[in-house]
Image (spheres, helix red, strand yellow):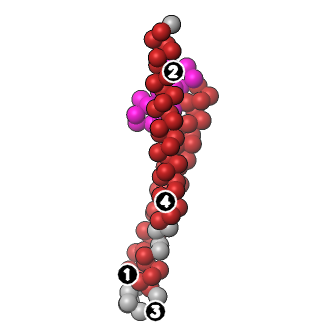
Amino acid sequence: MNFLLPGSGLFWLGYRMLGACLSGAFLSCFLAIMTIFLIGYGRYLSIALSENLMEGNNLEQAGAAFHTNWLVGIAAVGLLLYAISAILFSRAKRRLTRS
């Protein structure tokens, strides 16, 4: 479970608040990335399908439509949440198997 949605395994093991917080933060990152990408894709399509892509600064605007720095930053936060969730899940699982 923790592999598909970080925090859900912790939620299942009884760490409800921690699991819910990690899942919520990860889903927020995912939704932010999808929103930024789809808005950027819409801007890219409107620029690319305009009359002349080589006219003015349309080519530069098309390259900057995706906000790459934001996408990479939010993806890095999501991966960090994924790693934290995996570490906490393995520790919680070991505690439960010992007792």
- Which of the two labelled residues, at mark 1 and mark 3, occupies the earlier sequence position? 1
Which of the marked residues, 3 or 4, is nearer the chain's N terminus?
3
Q: Is residue 92 above or below residue 67?
A: above
> Could you tell which of marks 1 and 2 lies nearer the N-terminus?
1
List x then y, in percent, for residue 89.
48, 26
Picture coordinates of residue 53 (x, y %)?
38, 87
Q: Residue at x 47, y 45 (%)?
A: 79
Q: Nearer the viewer, residue 70 or 23?
A: 70
Give the distance between the C-alpha atoms of the residues marked 1 and 3, in whole angstroms.
15 Å
- Sequence order check: which comes first, mark 4 or mark 1? 1
Give SS at disc 3.
Answer: loop
Task: Name the element at disc 2.
Answer: helix
Q: Which structural element holds mark 4?
A: helix
Range shown magenta: 1-15
| Frontmost residue, 84 versus 4 | 84
Q: Nearer the viewer, mark 3 or mark 2?
A: 2
Q: Earlier in the sequence, mark 2 or mark 4?
A: 4
**Classed neighbour count for the residue bearing mark 2: other residues with Cα under 10 Å, few (<14), some (14–19), many (≥20):** some
Q: Which mark is residue 71?
A: 4
Gap between marks 3 and 2, in whole Å?
58 Å
Residue type (three-letter) at the residue carrying disc 2: Ala
Q: Amino acid at mark 4?
A: Leu
Marks 1 and 2 sit apart, C-alpha to C-alpha, by 52 Å
Q: Label 1 belongs to which residue?
A: 49
Which residue bears the numbered disc 2?
A: 92
State how far apart marks 3 and 4 are (Cα).
Answer: 26 Å
Disc on res. 56: 3
Question: Dividing the image into 4 quarters, which one contains the N terminus?
Answer: top left
Dividing the picture into quarters, in which one does residue 25 lie? top right
